[in-house]
Image (cartoon, rainbow, N blue to C red):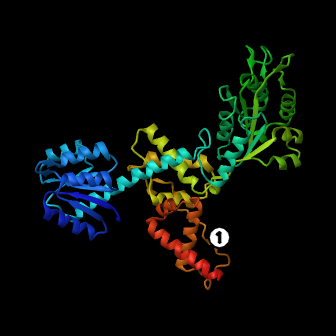
Amino acid sequence: MNASVLVIDDDEDACTLVEDALSGKGYRVVSTTDVRKGLNALADGDFDAVLTDLHMGAYSGLQVCEWVRDNRPAIPVIVCTAFGDLKAAVGALRAGAYDFITKPIELPALLHALDRAVQHFRLKAEVKRLNAEVTKARGGGDLVGRSPVMRKVYDVIQRVSATDASILITGESGTGKELVARALHTESPRQSQPFLAINCAAVPSNLLESELFGHVRGAFTDAKTARRGLFQQADQGTVFLDELGEMPADMQAKLLRVIQERKVRPVGGNEEIPFDCRIVAATNRDLEEEVEEGRFREDLYYRLNVVQIHVPPLRARGGDILLLAQNFIEKTAARMNKAVVGISPEAARKLLQYDWPGNVRQLENWMERAVTFTQFEQITVEDLPDKITSSVPPLASSWPDVDDENLPTMQEVETRYMERVLKATGGNKAQTARVLGMDRRTLYRKLDRLIEAGAGRQG
């Protein structure tokens, strides 16, 4: 386990037996027969778990539990109690113990309890670290990510948010283009005013003009009252035109005039009404190609494309996948009132291997599904959809012209995969080690050998 355990028992022989047994299984053990010394060691040192006897003369295991609960609450405590003393065991749990085992201690039961306790402790520490990373990785609003490509997006948002320049956001479906638009609004001087969005592909063409520009009473059937359009409703705020590439040609001409004049004429009306709002548009189409093919107005394209922000696909964002997954797990678990706090290393590897054609929207959907299905504190591989669990990392693409006589060695495959995970996590060695299922010292040794091999090839 490579874990550190503090053993407190007033029976010196019992301490020695437990210490020898755990040390032989790879644990780092500190033992003491003095409760005060044990608590001082806890105050000064780092431990993954505490194993304490329940009855120890002037002190009891309950006092140890209470001290840990008040001073080092993240550290799990396992209490040893006499066989059949259920009342004492319940009292220990109420005092903050993580688990209890009965005497005489059987090594398999002790190892099982310690393994669960250490995993629990490390999971809580990992969740705390990921929570801090998610907080640091927020680029405005609900945007999450620390990858180089997302840092470029944040940089552009910061540079242009205070201006009134029209923005065109591009990117594949599901990448979070509306979140970028909302971040632009949130970071702008217009943040206290309305942010109104419309999906140009979801509104029938005969109603789109009314939605955008409004209408007067009697302008058409069922227009029993006058209605203000989005440009008027969002006055002093921001209008977000999603799926701009789906807008019909006749509406493109009308939108161009509105943008140029900064006035709208409601459907059926005779007066033009001025408005003041920022316009942000988004599309998953290549509008330059649409212009060349005559399907989108060139003059409107340049009016809206004063600044372009490209939102990268999820597959290009590396370790952001795990940050986003953690974010979605926390939100879904809180909504469902489930004690799900993270994701197992094996499941994390599967997430990093997958290509994510549906991007962030697909990840959010599948993390919600995983939280719904799981019966544990962590999302496991079994909780993930078959599409993820059956996916194969694209290592073969790194080995062109591979045949039966030119197969990579296992060491070469491991090296390539290690490099891939290291790149996906943005060079974060601690996160890489967790995904690979190895401790950091092992990873460092492998990286040192990799560097030495590279230096040898250069020499």
Is 14 placed left or right of 2 in the picture? left
* Secondary structure type for disc 1: helix
Using the image, determine if residue 11 lies above or below residue 247. Answer: below
Q: For the residue marked with disc 1, what is the amino acid?
A: Ser
Residue that carries the numbered disc 1 in the rendered image: 397
Instruction: Identify which residue, 78 or 34, lies in the foreground.
Output: 34
Q: Residue at coordinates 85% horizontally, 43% vertically from top-left?
A: 295
Residue 291 at what x, y percent from top left? 87, 46
| Quadrant in which the C terminus appears | bottom right
Q: Residue furthest bottom?
A: 405
Q: Is residue 225 left or right of residue 435?
A: right
Placement of the N terminus among the 4 image quadrants: bottom left
Badge 1 density bin: few <14, some 14–19, many ≥20, Cα 10 Å: few
Is 197 placed left or right of 258 in the picture? left
* Residue 325 seen in this snapshot: yes
**Residue 5 locus on image (x, y percent):** 28, 59
Which residue is at a point 52% across and 45% down the rendered structure image?
327
Q: Residue at x 10, y 50 (%)?
A: 57
Closer to the camera, 262 or 152? 152
For the point 84% across and 47% down, the residue is 290
Answer with the quarter of the image where residue 202 lies. top right
Q: Nearer the viewer, residue 434 or 361?
A: 434
Residue 368 in view (yes/no):
no
